[in-house]
Image (spheres, grey):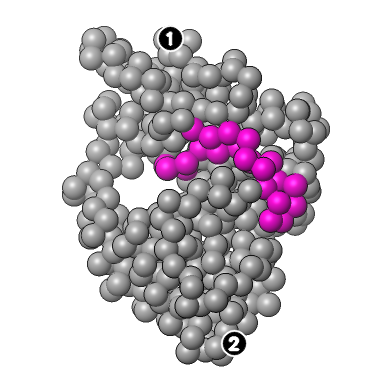
Amino acid sequence: MKILAIETSCDETAAAIVEDGTKLIASTIATSKELHEKTGGIVPEVAARKQVESIVPVIEDCLEKAELSLEDIDKLAVTVGPGLVGSLVVGIAAAKSLALVLEKPLIPVNHLVGHIYANWIDVDKAPEFPALVLIVSGGHTDLVLMKDHGKLEFLGGTLDDAAGEAFDKTARLLGIKKYLGGPELSKISASCEVNNIQGVLPRPKIKDEDYDFSFSGLKTAVKRIAEKGNYELESLANEFETAVVDVLVTKAIKAAEQYKVKSILLGGGVAANTQLRSRLKFEAEKLNVSVHIPEIAFCTDNAIYIASAAYFNQTEKDIKELQVDSSLGIMDMV
């Protein structure tokens, strides 16, 4: 089964064709990142306007790469939330139009659930259930118990800043980069040979019994050090990154032990973080639990995992009733 998926939850305009939920046939992504770099953040109206311009060329390019026509597509899928309202409208309108004209089913997909399914694309072995899922992105940080496809149990999430948001805001306050500076902060962290301030930053909620997260206080602690002006950028960046990863890995491993899972899955933009990937694998090996981490290219927003999620969770909906739900979270799927 070939599914054409459309993803427009933020500033990217993406389309992908995936066969049987696991085989990537083609993918195309257009972004308005360069416009948002000038303003130091995403302007929703600007993002949506660029998506209106890009949506048709992106779909056409994806089909051309796949050497397929719309008639060759079996079903369509689209992100319905969470995300920017205007951006979601663009993708949903395009998907509904195609579904109506082609008279083919349309599957709505939760963007966060989509991130999970990056772990099913072009892999030798699919994750086993039950699985623990750690979704870490710019807007969300969630721990989810996945008992099977479509059977999710929310364990905990961030109470304030998401991990990716904390990375980007910390990079901004340290003067590293105004917009999406998290990856640059990680590069600086990796260049640190000796962390001279190891342990100086807090590890919020790391010893708490629950599975919730909180990173706003950590960001504030960095700000206080930065304001004093007496610090090495490499050490502070490394200490911040290590503090975030300490919390994420500790909570994930604790949940994996408690729920006796067979697999741990990582998803979201921060899943590309090198330290997080390596340390999660290292700790999981002690439990004899397999770790599944998407390729770097599949971590950021794309339509590939939207198509995969649609295949494994084929809950079709009346096209006329399908609409935006920008506040949709992972808790709404359990």
Q: 88 left or right of 271?
A: left
- Real-space CA distance between mark 2 and mark 1, rounded to the nearest whole angstrom: 58 Å
Q: Earlier in the sequence, mark 2 or mark 1?
A: 2
Kind of residue sitting beneath label 1: Val
Q: Position of residue 84 (x, y in %)?
A: 35, 56
Q: 72 left or right of 194?
A: right
Q: 115 left or right of 258?
A: left
100 in relation to 146, above or below: below
* Residue at the spot 65% in from the left edge and 73% down from the top edge: 19
Q: Is residue 71 visible?
A: yes
Q: Secondary structure at mark 1?
A: loop
Front residue of 288/78: it is: 78
Q: Position of residue 289 (x, y in %)?
A: 77, 36
What label sits on residue 72 in the rendered view? 2
Front residue of 151/116: it is: 151
Q: Position of residue 248 (x, y in %)?
A: 56, 29
Q: Quadrant of residue 77?
A: bottom right
Q: Which residues are magenta?
A: 137-158
Kind of residue sitting beneath label 2: Asp
Q: Is residue 194 visible?
A: no
* Residue at the spot 53% in from the left edge and 57% down from the top edge: 110
What label sits on residue 200 in the rendered view? 1
Q: Secondary structure at mark 2?
A: helix
Q: Position of residue 121 (x, y in %)?
A: 64, 60
Magenta span main SS = strand
* Residue at the spot 42% in from the left edge and 42% down from the top edge: 138
38 in relation to 2, above or below: above
* Residue at the spot 48% in from the left edge and 73% down from the top edge: 321
Specify few, some or many for label 2: CA neighbours under 10 Å numbering under 14, 14-19, or 20 or more.
few
Front residue of 263/98: it is: 98
Image quadrant where one finds the N terminus: bottom right
26 falls in the magenta region = no
